[in-house]
Amino acid sequence: MIAKLRRLSWESYAWLIYSLPYVYASFDARLTAIETAVMLLAYLGFLALYLAGQVMRGPRILWLVVALDALAMAFAPTNPGAASFVIYGAAMLANAFPPKQAALALAVQIAVGAGGLAAIGMPWWYTGMLAVISTLIGAVTIQAARNEAGNVKLRLAQAEVERLAKLAERERIARDLHDVLGHTLSVIVLKSELAQKLITRDPARAAAEMAEVERIARDGLAEVRQAITGYRSSGFAAELEHVRETLVAAGIQATIEAGAVALAPAQETALSLALREATTNVIRHAAATRCHIRFYAKDGSVLMEVADNGRGSDAPFGNGLTGMRERIQALGGMLQRDSGEGTRLLIKLPI
């Protein structure tokens, strides 16, 4: 409780200024010392109830409101400032119930508080003014609580959106890095193995292959930097030519049919990375001798096929194919894999 009180804002204490008329009236010269002391003790009780209402939440607050109404009825005949206790009670109900139930409890509280004061002989204007002020204060605090609840939901929604955006960005970077590095490292391995075989038979050719390894490694590093910063690849046409060279270097006969299709930057990047991942899988897993790549437009869509004559596979998608499918689906497209005599990968994107 003490820790919660320390966290209260200055506004919670500032509202106590409206209880000062009660304190002032407690020192009326017509009162005896004992009556003054009793009223001040009652004020300490009010302070305890008020502060408890600032940190407490839920229906238990209703007991605090009942106690405040009782204090008001007990001391209003000799100290009119006690009417403010009913108003403080009305303000607490916003933290006791949801808005609709709080409004109903407010109506009951005002009827009991104002009606009780009228029953003990307080003037009609006194109880009427008390009812009006309590209604206004109670309605304002209930609306404020409703707005705060809405703001909390909005903040939670914004936090969730930010979390999902960060997660999507991490997944995008992971997919891009996998596609870029998987292809580049596969080519480096192939050329390094070739250079190792040629180093004794043809040192000049081996040196040329190692120089090519260096170039590919540098290009791969640049592509990783581009992927991290969100830049798109150098273009689909350039990717097609690069893939052809890679397949030939791996000893795979490559045939490519590519029509002229206008692509959006996001589509070009997605298809380039998909082509790179698909040919990497052909080189690493298919044990193929031929690979046919076809790129064309049909019925308002652009299609890309990558087919090989390898051993084929119905194995579940790995990280590369999963990332490829997610990237294509994010652009409204589809990815299909058919396995039989080799593997055929079909990607379709709306133009």
Image (tube, rainbow, N blue to C red):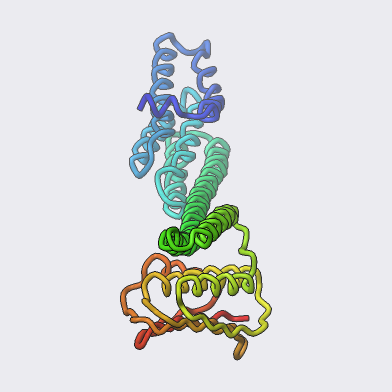
Residue 254, how many percent across, how many down? 51, 80
Report the residue that reaches farthest toward the left.
315
Q: Quadrant of residue 92?
A: top left
Q: Quadrant of the C terminus?
A: bottom right
Report the residue that reaches farthest toward the top.
33
Residue 29, how many percent across, how many down? 52, 10
Of residues 214 and 129, which is closer to you in this image?
214
Horizontal side, residue 236 vs residue 199: left or right: right
Of residues 153 and 120, which is closer to you in this image?
153
Horizontal side, residue 245 vs residue 351: left or right: left
Horizontal side, residue 56 vs residue 9: left or right: left
For residue 324, say whether it is visible: yes
Q: Quadrant of the N terminus?
A: top left
Count of marks overlaid on the render = 0
**Residue visible at 50% across and 36% down?**
87
Of residues 110 and 153, which is closer to you in this image?
153
Report the residue that reaches farthest toward the bottom.
299
Of residues 223 and 139, which is closer to you in this image?
223
Q: Quadrant of residue 344?
A: bottom left
Q: Quadrant of residue 36?
A: top left
Identify whether 215 is placed above or below 337. above
**Residue visible at 40% across and 82% down?**
343
Identify whether 153 is placed above or below 195. above
Residue 273, how many percent across, how many down? 53, 68
Residue 184, how many percent across, how many down? 49, 61
For residue 303, say whether it is visible: no
